[in-house]
Amino acid sequence: MYKYLRVPSERNPNPVAVGSRVTATTSKQVKDYLLCAGCEDRFNNGGEKEVLRWVWNGQRFPLGDRLAVAAPYYPFGNFQLFSGTDVGVDTEKFGYFALSVVWRAAVHQWTLHFGEKTAVLDLGSLQDPIRQYLHGDIDLPAEIAILLTACTDQASVGSFYTPSRMLNIPGTAFGLLTLGVHFSVHVGYDIPPSIRQVCCVRSSRHLIFQRDCERKTVEAFGELIKTSKPARGLE
């Protein structure tokens, strides 16, 4: 995703990173040594490689393009609902990817672009069952539901951020944005039935939402922007 946001034609081709103290272009990435090569390969084949086929790639947004010519499974209000099965999208791999990123944010504290540290996510008693699922030992735990949304606004299509706790919603959930694809990962024993029914992994039609996500994206960056100082020359 870092590569997709680079603009080779610019004097400084690096993407803009937003931190709580500074906002600047940078070539630094959020990375660390955590897993063995076998597990990294499992994560790559299990979801990462598939998701990267569909997110904004610097020129186009393949998932948005696919949904633009597909018939909605269920249009409603300010969003539309599509069947991943009907449109040819493997939503189970999307769910696997999202859960793998959330799990990594729960078992390790990561260093961000400008030296800040991530907040370690709390998955409670589900942390090890999630590990077992990611390792291929068990099916997706019943206490997990993952919602997959294709965003229609440019702010969300051109951005990504690490997982964080979602506020003002029932139960415990974590949000993650990946260049036009937003994930809501719900965990716990009190997930509302309405959420369970639209899980992209477990629902019978492997559902995909489509909606304008700009408000959610602006809120996610908003708290950082309040205290972040733009680097010189950054528009």
Image (cartoon, rainbow, N blue to C red):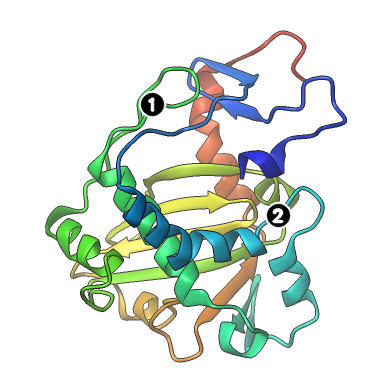
Nearest the eye: 143 or 27: 27
Find numbered disc 1 in the image and state the secondary structure of the residue it sits on: loop
Amino acid type, label 2: Trp
Left or right of residue 74: residue 46? left
Left or right of residue 182: residue 57? right
Residue position marked by numbered label 2 in the rendering = 56
Q: Could you say where residue 66 lies in the image, as x and y percent from the top left?
A: 74, 75
Rendered image: mark on residue 102 = none
Q: CA distance from mark 2 to mark 1?
A: 25 Å
Is residue 137 in sight in this rendering?
A: yes
Q: Could you say where residue 99 lies in the image, as x and y percent from the top left?
A: 36, 60
Residue position marked by numbered label 1 in the rendering = 111
Q: Residue at x 43, y 68 (%)?
A: 95
Left or right of residue 217: residue 93? left
Q: Residue at x 64, y 43 (%)?
A: 159
Amino acid type, label 1: Thr
Q: Is residue 108 above or below residue 212?
A: above
